[in-house]
Amino acid sequence: MAYIIEVKNSNENFITWSEKDYISAKLKELIIDSNILIVPVENFREIKEPVFPQRTEELFKYLQTELPEQVKVEIAIEDDEYQELALYHDLVDIGNFIVTIIALPFLVSILANYVTMKSFDKKGDDIKLTLTTVEGDISRTIIYEGKATDFIASSEEIKKLCLGEPNTLKLSENILDPVKTEKIVAKKK
C-alpha cells in the first residue's frame, strides 16, 4: 500500500491563526508564545464553527505531558467553543498543526508514539495529519495520508521533508506544479 505526502508552500503561521475573530486577546498571546499550535478545520461542509478531529483534546493533553518543558503547545480555540467532529470511516484524522522548526522533531516523534499507543498501526488504520512548519517568514505544509505503520516507519523522513532537507524516500512519483505543490507517492520500502 502506498502513502501520499503532499508538500506545499503556505501562508499559515502563528500570527495568522492568532488573528482569527474567534480568538481572544489572552489566547492570542498564548498562541504567539507557543511552539506548537493545534488548529481547527474551518467551514467543514455545512458547519460554520471551527471543529477539531475526534480525540484532539486527548492528544493535546498527551502532548502537554510528553513534550519537553520548554516546548509550549496550544490549541486555537477558546475552551467554551471547542467542538469535535466525529467522522466514522477508515481514515483517522490526527489533526492539523502549526509548528516551529525547533519543536518539529519533538512533535513528529511524539505523534509516532501516539499512533503506536492508540494502536492505529495494529488495526491497520489509515491516518491523516497536516504539519505546517514555520521558520521566520517561511511556512511549508506537509500532509501525510496513509497507513499508520508507514507513518511510524517514515517519521524521520517526514521530519526531513518538513525541514526542507534531502530525504531518502523511495519515490514512485514526484510532481511539481506552478504553485509549488509537490506530491510524493511513496511505496513501502
Image (tube, rainbow, N blue to C red):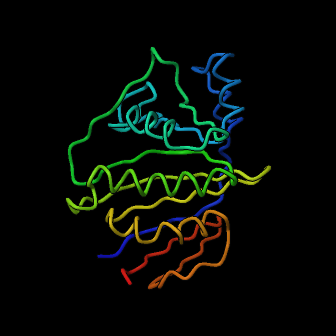
In this figure, what is the number of numbered marks? 0
Q: Position of residue 68 (x, y in %)?
A: 60, 43
Question: In the image, is residue 26 above or below residue 147?
Answer: above
Q: Position of residue 143 (x, y in %)?
A: 49, 58
Question: In the image, is residue 113 above or below residue 41?
Answer: below
Please give left or right for residue 149 compared with residue 155 in the image.
left
Q: Position of residue 116 (x, y in %)?
A: 33, 56
Q: Quadrant of residue 13?
A: top right
Q: Position of residue 2 (x, y in %)?
A: 34, 75
Question: In the image, is residue 137 above or below residue 150?
Answer: above
Q: Quadrant of the C terminus?
A: bottom left
- Which residue is found at the position 46% from the left and 29% from the top? 50
- Which residue is found at the position 29% from the left and 76% from the top? 1
Q: Nearer the viewer, residue 96 or 182?
A: 96
Q: Nearer the viewer, residue 169 or 105?
A: 105
- Which residue is found at the position 48% from the left and 52% from the top? 110
Please give left or right for residue 56 compared with residue 86 in the image.
right
Q: Quadrant of residue 101?
A: bottom right
Seen as rendered, the residue at the extreme right is: 136
Please give left or right for residue 158 compared with residue 180 in the image.
left
Please give left or right for residue 107 compared with residue 163 in the image.
left
